[in-house]
Image (cartoon, rainbow, N blue to C red):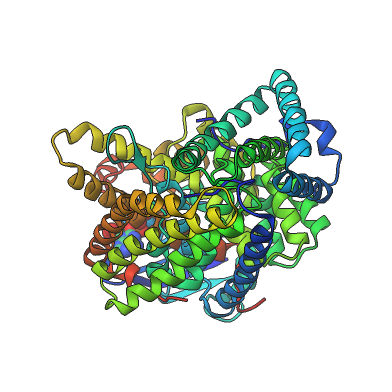
Amino acid sequence: MIEVRGLSYRYPGGERALEGVSFAVRKGEAFAVVGPNGSGKTTLLLSLMGLLKFRGEIRIFGHQLNGKGLRELRRSIGFVFQDPDTQLFMPTVGEDVAFGPQQFGYSGDEAKRMVKEALRAVRMEGYEGRFTHRLSYGEKKKIALATALVLSPEILIFDEPTSNLDPASRREFLDLIGGLNCTRIFATHDMDMVRRIADRVLVLFEGRKAAECDVESLFKSPENLRKWRLA
Amino acid sequence: MSHYWTSDLADRPSFFGRIDPRLRFFLFLSALGVISAAGGRLLFGATLFLIGVMLFSVAASAKFRRSVLRALLALLPFGAFVVFLMSLSRETGGPSPLLRGLCSLILIALFVTMMGFDELREVLRSLRVPSIFITLLGFVYRYFFLFREELEKMDMALKNRSFSSSRLEGWRLRALLIGQVLLRSYRRSEEVYRAMTARGYDRKER
Amino acid sequence: MHIPDGFLDPKLVALSDVAAIGLIGLAARKVERKLSPERIPLMGMLGALVFAAQLLTFPVVGGTSAHLVGAVLLAVLLGPFSGFLLMAAVLLLEALLFQHGGILAFGANLLNMGFIGAFGGYFLYRAGGSTPLSAGLSALLTVVISAVLCALELSISGVVSIKTALPAMALAHLITGAIEGIVTFSLLSFLVREAPEITGGERI
Ligand SMILES: Nc1ncnc2c1ncn2[C@@H]1O[C@H](COP(=O)(O)OP(=O)(O)O)[C@@H](O)[C@H]1O
Ligand SMILES: [Mg+2]
């Protein structure tokens, strides 16, 4: 479903953030990208969305990820940014969730219906008229998920979905993610989350791939976890 | 932190909610136009009437109480300044401008409590105000609260650290503080652009 | 100085509102046509920042304080048309959220602060050699010019007499202007040093 070969990226004026990373994600699985801070997780996710000019090859549904048809590909990929204040840039929840559908040309009524459905999916019915800046962090996270779900994507990408959430919100959010049946890719260093919902894992260390394996085999080797600063 | 525009649909008075927002907007502007051109007996009557409405609404709604208080406070510095200037010379307009100012502010305070920001943008859109302007209004409104919080936090930190700086140095430090938040807002704008792009925003293709 | 409703002559109000709406239309067209799309969220963020920064009060003497306008800063970072458009958004929100300045008087306030600050300020900045210093001086000057305009408008409307209003407003705003100038200068020197990518961007 997603094939990545030799992915490299260097930030303008910065050090190399990714170096020759290759991996594959299968349809319907929950795929975790783990690694300590600064290991390149966010950079990798942004590349998958075609938001960075990377070197190497990314294929999604067999299509090469580059200039042509990029927007159509993005339509079937939802992205939940780490900071919900980045993702939610409109004054009200309704306008924000409707942003995606509007960009893809849905009419006002259709968009409204889609918004309603997406809000129901994250258990936030009736929040259309709420002002984004007055929501709690946990609520913002759920609305951010709704903005990604609204176009019924086949792939969902999350950057650090559980960071900064209090225990109850974290559990709610994990239940939501675990309950979805599309392909999910998430970057995290929350190893409990990996244990609970991931099927397979990619370990990044200093911009390189350190491992790609099942969740069970990852947890079998405590010394590796410590070496990669995951435990 | 409640001194900003409250317009959650939930606590908007249902009576006004049923009137078309465009009509509400138009009525408001007309009333404001009449008041701000009024003089003599009409102005006197309007003042009494609006003060009555104000007292009634203040008694009826906590939300309006806040709104009116804010409006009256807003008139204070300018009003005081005008009164000061008037007191310096004889050939001036008398108390009418002050009464008109008071009436207008009561009207605006009323308007703000019965019009949501989303509704207002809808009205502006239907009046064919350029869409880029409405987009910018949205961004400025959305991120104002966030940056205010960031600035307040940094300002507190600054106050706790610098006791002995001169006034001039204080102004300069303030500027650097705004500079720090500005740098962060620049990074955030790049991120927001990514978030928009990820959701299909592309001006070239549309 | 934000003028509330009710103080200005209705004819002056109508005239300034028409002018302001025309200028917003013009600036919007220009920005929509010329500006690259990634600059739009940047405009929004900087507008929000200036709006928030206007709430910081700068102690002057005794109990009095002043606050920023930020028009010259926006015009220098983004260009005069963008700066003007943002000032329009900021002033409108300020009138609605805090009742600083009237709704019908929005046109006059936008001309006094937004137009003078963004277009006048940008012109002075360029004329002075496009340095942080010229931006600071231009910020000082435009604040004083705005105050003078405000005094003129009030006296045309017969609220105060020009003989007292003009010197009083100009003098009072020399101090606010000095703050605006120092802040604009220090901020831009800081940005030129630390983040040239911000000060060297596209200006419309
Ligand atoms: N905008 C940027 N400019 C320059 N360097 C960056 C930028 N964003 C990230 N980096 C660098 O790239 C590396 C990988 O960062 P990132 O992908 O954010 O890691 P992670 O998400 O795993 O914490 C880090 O060394 C970081 O400092
Ligand atoms: Mg990250």
Foreground residue, B156 or A76? B156
Instruction: Measuring from the top left, give residue B59's x and y in whole percent.
Output: 71, 18
Q: Residue A79 is drawn in which quadrant?
A: bottom right
The answer to whether residue C132 is left or right of residue C147 is left
Foreground residue, C77 or A203? C77
Position of C101 relative to B62 (above/below):
below
In percent of the image, x 64 and y 47: which residue is there?
A146
In percent of the image, x 30 and y 50: which residue is there?
C175
The answer to whether residue A187 is left or right of residue C141 is right
Foreground residue, A185 or C4? C4
Residue furthest out toward the front = B90
The answer to whether residue A157 is left or right of residue B47 is left
In percent of the image, x 26 and y 56: which residue is there?
C182
Position of B189 relative to C171 (above/below):
below
Q: Ligand 1 is located in which of the four quadrants?
A: bottom left
Q: Residue B104 is drawn in which quadrant?
A: top right
Instruction: Measuring from the top left, give residue A156's x and y in whole percent.
Output: 58, 55
Q: How many marks?
A: 0
Instruction: Measuring from the top left, give residue C141's x and y in whole percent.
Output: 34, 64
Residue A29 visible in this rendered orientation of the protein:
no
In percent of the image, x 25 and y 47: which residue is there?
B171
